[in-house]
Amino acid sequence: MKYLSTRDSQLRVSSAEAVKLGLSRDGGLLTPETVPQIDGAFLQSLTGASYQERTAKVMALYLTDYTEEELLTFANNAYGPDKYDDPAAAPLRKVDKNTYCLELWHGPTSAFKDMALQMLPQLLSAALQKTGEDKTVCILVATSGDTGKAAMEGFADVPQTKIMVFYPKDGVSAVQEAQMVTQEGENVGVCAVVGNFDDAQSGVKRIFSNEEIRKTLANRGYLLSSANSINWGRILPQVVYYVSAYCDLLRDGEIQMGDRVNFCVPTGNFGDILAAYYAKRMGLPIGKLICASNKNDVLADFLRTGVYDRNRPFHNTISPSMDILVSSNLERLLFDLSGENDAEVRGYMETLAKEGKYEVSNKIKMALQEQFWGGSCGEEHTAAAIARYYREYGYLIDTHTAVAAGVMERYRQETGDKTPTVFVSTASPYKFCDSVLTAIGEAPKGDGVELLDQLNTVSGVAVPRRLAALKGKQRRFDLTAEKTEMDNVVLDFLK
Ligand SMILES: *Cc1c(COP(=O)(O)O)cnc(C)c1O
């Protein structure tokens, strides 16, 4: 199977190259040329299988440069008991008679980014061998919290790779900072940047586009790459858990083969729900894809009107991992819905760059509205959802998951749709103790790691073992840089 650029469908690369490149040179996103189809027999064969086996079977349909055996080894490394605290890796929890929650935070950093970032480094390391690359890849990441830690954890000690993470000095939570500065591994580095997330992000972008630095590093045997969610190697592992959730519903007798199921996904960059869209395109019986935004509601407006308009205020919310105004992965959806019309997609992206907005064709708008339903959930409504789930179901959910729960509720009220619905849980409530405590009516006492104990005492829910272990951990990194110094930090790191 080949991969095309969303901005030039003449360009064709292999699956290993797509993983290695991350982004196409023309700025487009690398996207599979056809969507492999699955049927009832395929799903039936997976109902008794482990999460790891399901992963190998689904990913093998797309990654034709890799053997199924190889993928199974990667899946065992990624989702096994030393990484995941639940043998199902992505367990499905029944909430009421037609509502289920897909928990994606049982991995090492307690956020759903582990599902992809435990897999991508292994795919990348193998891709280097498959494409005859002898340089070491250095991953540069700017993070607002979750991605940096998940990427460090995934890349730690992976052969032929190094990783350097930049985070805004006063812009991440105490737990998130503790997670990063205690990271183990010989090939990892982390640096606080004086400034906000945008400063860190533009610093990284500047380094990527600096030809002189690239040359210096190439002479030293290094190649720069990125681990953010535009890499197909991050989207594909996410397709697996939608298939897996359906297989669990079948196995448990909750549905019959062929019954439709809705998924409600909290999203910012449109990565997670794009994976659900691919699962549907493969033939998984999905009804509506419900796209849940927080107060930054650019996607909800887009799905309703067909106009994507980033010219609006940016809100810092209690679900910070979804505070995004430009959803990069939407480009892959537009490419697919336009019938792989690269010129049309290029047009939208140019207009977005120039004017901060674009309007899709009527054809795309109709297709969007048939497949998706978009809604947003404000701050109060988010906190109320946490309180309600805790009170009614004894179920403690985090702020991002609560956005999904809130939007799902609105969808059901407005449409009357009774289809069984799975909403996606993307972080452990322990990653956002402060907001979760407040939502259930407790005043947070102290900060950072201390709040883990308070939430535990109040709720009785076990603290994820890796978060609990943070308290005794030695700080390994203590590097701070001005934003203008970031290139020197990288040159130092890659001596
Ligand atoms: C990153 C993140 C999201 C949003 O994921 P997308 O890739 O933007 O769909 C949601 N919840 C949490 C906890 C996250 O870390």
Image (tube, rainbow, N blue to C red):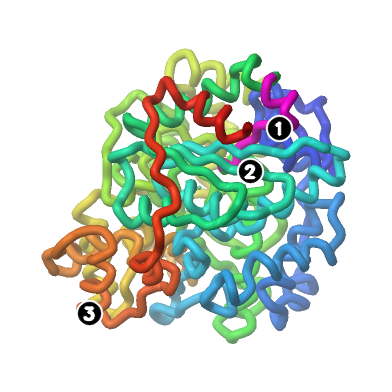
- Tell me the kind of residue under disc 3: Thr
Q: Looking at the image, is mark 2 or mark 3 nearer the viewer? A: 2
Is 219 part of what is drawn in magenta?
yes
- Tell me the kind of residue under disc 2: Lys
Is 155 part of what is drawn in magenta?
no
The N terminus sits in image quarter:
top right
Q: Residue at x 19, y 54 (%)?
A: 380
**Other-residue count near label 3 (Cα within 10 Å), few / some / many at <14 / 14–19 / ≥20:** few
User: For mark 3, what is the residue?
Assistant: 457
User: For mark 1, what is the residue?
Assistant: 222
Q: Which mark is residue 162?
A: 2
Picture coordinates of residue 435, whole percent (x, y):
23, 58
Picture coordinates of residue 202, whole percent (x, y):
45, 25
Q: Looking at the image, is mark 3 or mark 1 nearer the viewer? A: 1
Q: Which mark is residue 382?
A: none
The region drawn magenta spans: 216-228
- Tell me the kind of residue under disc 1: Tyr
Q: Residue at x 42, y 34 (%)?
A: 305
Picture coordinates of residue 341, whole percent (x, y):
70, 27
Q: Is residue 180 visible?
A: no
Which badge, 1 or 2, comes first in the chain's sequence? 2
Query: Marks 3 and 1, how far apart in space?
Result: 48 Å
